[in-house]
Amino acid sequence: MSEEKTDYSMEPASAAAKTETAAAESEKTAAAAAADALPEKKKETGVEVKGDSVARSAMIVMIAMIVSRILGYLRDVIIYAQIGQNHFTDAYNAAFKIPDCIYMILVGGALSAAFIPVISSYIAKGEKESIWRFTSVVINVISCLLLLLVIIAYIFAPQFIGFYVRGFDAETLRLTVVLTRIMLLQAVLMAMAGICQGILQAYKIFTPTAVGSVLYNVGIIVVGAAFSGLIESHYPGYGITAFSIGVVAGAFGNFFVQAVALRKIGMRYHFSFDVTNEGFRRMVLLMLPVFVSLGAVQLNLFVNSGLASFLPQGYLSALNTAQRLMQLPVSIFGVSIAMAVFPVLSREAALEKHDEFRKDFAYAIRTILFIMFPFSLLLVVLGVPFIRFLYEIGKFTGDNTEAVAFALYFYAIGIFAYGCIQVLNRAFYAMQDTRRPVIVAVSGVAINLILSFVLIRYLQHGGLALAYSAAGICNMLFLFLLLKRKLGRIGLREILLSAAKTLIASAAMAAAAYGVSFASEQILGVASKWAQMVQLFSGGIVGMVVFLIAAKLLRMPEMETVTGRIKRKLKRS
């Protein structure tokens, strides 16, 4: 897929590029420390859940995400430097839509929403044999459905693609069909890897997932960089296909790592299609509402791609690049924290430990807001310097930078909402309630579609980004209201107080970062990479120092956790 597959629910499967300056390191520490503060668990029904397991899991995933994003940035730089931001990269980005749709419907959203809670309940009760019978049925049934969908997609690819990107010219359409058919192979590999990841994560094993996400980008970079020139010399205009082949190679590497890890935990495979299996039936019932949601989400993605295809050449690629930057904090921190806390919430729900469930949920949300607000404002005030420094190489021009930055401004508005959605959805899934998140997701998609048709007329690709952010904020608010109605008390007062303090600290940070960045540009200019680096890093570092000082002065518990963790590290060393 356009990025390593994690369950983003309301978002397209994409992410990449990096905002690491001192900000990334400081916030990585904050996120891990916050996770570390979750209540200590004991042995429950024979299953040992150690107190720092969430922190370790979050840290493993976060570190891998950061490495993967660095590789993802290198991948994008190579593509844009060699190919440019034009109709070739528009075709490349559009080609992900059908494989992504297949993956997200079968595995990325619906299965992950229902699979982990069911298998976690088996683990919590110590029913090992039931686990492997259940997972074997899932693997066999999903494999057959995958094969059927891939065959249909391969045969009818020209018709599907011609329908959702009508604005492409004939040459770009042909290229999109070729790239799509190549990428269908990785849909199968990523789906199988996704099932393996679900099993491993239910056992609180996150390292293979982390390694696999790195290998995914390595495959794209190595194969794409090695063969794009060779293919272009023999088939002019088709050099971009090397990167699509690299996507398949990366997907295979990701699957291989998961499969090896699964064997090590003693999986016992059964050639069974017993759809009457109790766990399978329970999973299907949980999945059905999510299918409705994902169908609406995928329709939304296809409509947005279709709208973007009528915009000037390169705008679809600019929109995708901006969204990858927007997803940077969401995927590194939001998804990492949500993935790590999901098995914990699932066990607490299964064992009816409601107070611990509320406490873990609230702290996860507060931690995400503590990270997302400053990231959002940094991407606004340092968006142009960030994009200019990272991407203005080769055929990527200053106009391309402005196009990406324009969309990024509007995407940044919704970063905090999409971060919270990661935990909110999993809170419902942990309680085996998929109906409410589905209703909310469908309403969010409807809002997105309506606003997209309206705002694209006034803001072009920026309108699509603003519609996406507005839909995410509505989605988050609806989920909060429904969860409060379901649980009664969810620590909303503490969450709002923490959010208010984080906003104050973030505003101070943004003012400082912008001032330093502006002064640097006036003194050094932006003609050289050295000057661009000074502008970006000086603004980012000063901004983050101001944020951390402000958070300390406001006596935020999240900041106190960070300080305590650093002190413990220093004492141990």
Image: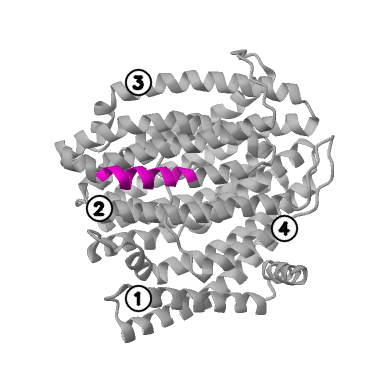
Kindly identify the amino acid type of the residue bearing the numbered disc 2. Gln
Secondary structure, mark 4, is: helix
Of callouts 1 and 3, the N-terminal one:
3
Of mark 1 and mark 2, the one earlier in the sequence is 2
User: Could you tell me what secondary structure mostly forms the magenta stretch?
Assistant: helix
Q: Residue 152 carries which label?
A: 3
Q: Is mark 2 on a helix, strand or loop?
A: helix
- Residue tagged by mark 1? 530
The quarter of the displayed image where residue 179 is located: top left
Q: Are the two marked residues, 1 and 2, in contact with CB atoms closer than 8 angstroms?
A: no
The disc placed on residue 82 is: 2
Q: Specify start and end residues of the magenta stretch as a single range.
A: 215-228
For the C terminus, the image quarter is: bottom right
Q: Name the residue at 35% across, 33% down.
A: 183
Q: In which quarter of the image is residue 91?
A: top left
Q: Are marks 1 and 3 in contact (CB under 8 Å)?
A: no
Name the residue: 84% across, 35% down: 46
Residue type indicated by callout 4: Asp
Q: Which mark is residue 36?
A: 4
- CA gap between label 3 and label 2 equals 33 Å
